[in-house]
């Protein structure tokens, strides 16, 4: 009887271990959180010159130093931070040295309008906002932090940081007169985290060529569903107009 019980207990343990192995929990894990959905970066093969212990500090290639080359790089490079996301790459549109550089976080999911970045209603609202502050649509340069849309439209803090640094280089190439930063994610990527009060909405954004004045406000998509956000956006834009007036 005792031997039979031992056999049953052993069978139960074996079954439990088999279940955990099937579930993929067959190795020890650390205490810190891990983003299991992040693609594993490809590692270059070790050459004889590098030896068995290559340098741990690999520097990425320099970003293109002209706007035309930068656009081509955004369109074709497999090395973009967001290259593993699916969908078409939506490139920036607008003139160099624009009166206003409009920066969003990611392209809209569907029904994108002429710009390719915004759904029709959001695009119409943006045009109205630009008109209200005296900027013609053709005078604005429109772009997003990421040229592809992530699943669910959400990015983690690390990705926002990487794309924010790339956008600072982008700003220096466009050399606009001012920035319009739309959306919470875009603000977190570009506006200093220690900014408070009015400086959070009318920041001076650092970039490779110095600093540039800007306004941080809501994404048009949010303003369409929350009239109070639209009113707050207009108050912020009025502050910018007053603050930047000669």
Image (tube, helix red, strand yellow):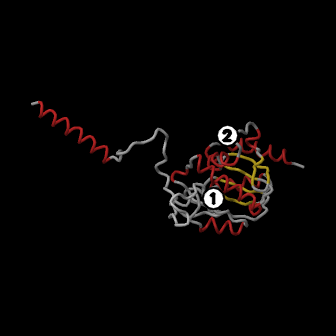
Q: Nearer the viewer, mark 1 or mark 2?
A: 1
The foreground one among 194 and 144 is: 194
Residue 65 place in picture, x, y as percent = 72, 65
Say whether residue 30 is left or right of residue 108. Answer: left
Residue that appears at 42% across and 42% down: 29
Q: Which mark is residue 174?
A: none
Q: Which mark is residue 59?
A: 1
Q: Quadrant of residue 139?
A: bottom right
Rounded to the nearest angstrom, the CA distance separating label 1 from label 2 is 46 Å
Q: Residue furthest left?
A: 1
Q: How many marks?
A: 2
Residue 144, can we see it? Answer: yes
Residue 119, can we see it? Answer: no
Q: Residue furthest right?
A: 246
Image quarter in which the N terminus is found: top left
Residue 228 place in picture, x, y as percent = 67, 40
Q: Which mark is residue 228?
A: 2
């Amino acid at each position: 009887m005792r031997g039979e019980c031992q056999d049953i207990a052993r069978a139960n343990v074996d079954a439990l271990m088999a279940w955990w192995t099937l579930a993929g929990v067959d190795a020890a894990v650390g205490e810190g959180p891990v983003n299991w959905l992040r693609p594993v970066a490809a590692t270059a093969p070790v050459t004889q010159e590098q030896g068995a212990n290559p340098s741990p500090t690999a520097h990425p290639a320099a970003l293109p130093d002209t706007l035309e080359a930068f656009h081509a790089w955004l369109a074709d490079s497999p090395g973009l931070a967001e290259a593993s996301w699916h969908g078409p790459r939506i490139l920036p549109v607008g003139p160099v040295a624009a009166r206003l550089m409009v920066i969003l976080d990611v392209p809209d999911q569907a029904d994108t309008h002429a710009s390719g970045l915004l759904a029709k209603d959001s695009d119409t609202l943006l045009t109205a906002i630009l008109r209200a502050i005296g900027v013609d649509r053709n005078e604005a340069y429109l772009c997003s932090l990421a040229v592809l849309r992530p699943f669910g439209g959400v990015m983690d803090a690390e990705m926002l940081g990487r794309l924010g640094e790339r956008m600072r280089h982008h700003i220096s190439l466009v050399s606009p007169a001012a920035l319009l930063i739309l959306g919470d994610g875009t603000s977190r990527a570009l506006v200093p985290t220690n900014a408070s009060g009015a400086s959070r909405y009318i920041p001076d954004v650092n970039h490779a060529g110095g600093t540039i004045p800007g306004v941080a406000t809501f994404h048009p998509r949010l303003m369409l569903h929350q009239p109070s956000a639209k009113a707050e956006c207009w108050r912020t834009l009025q502050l910018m107009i007053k603050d930047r007036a000669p």
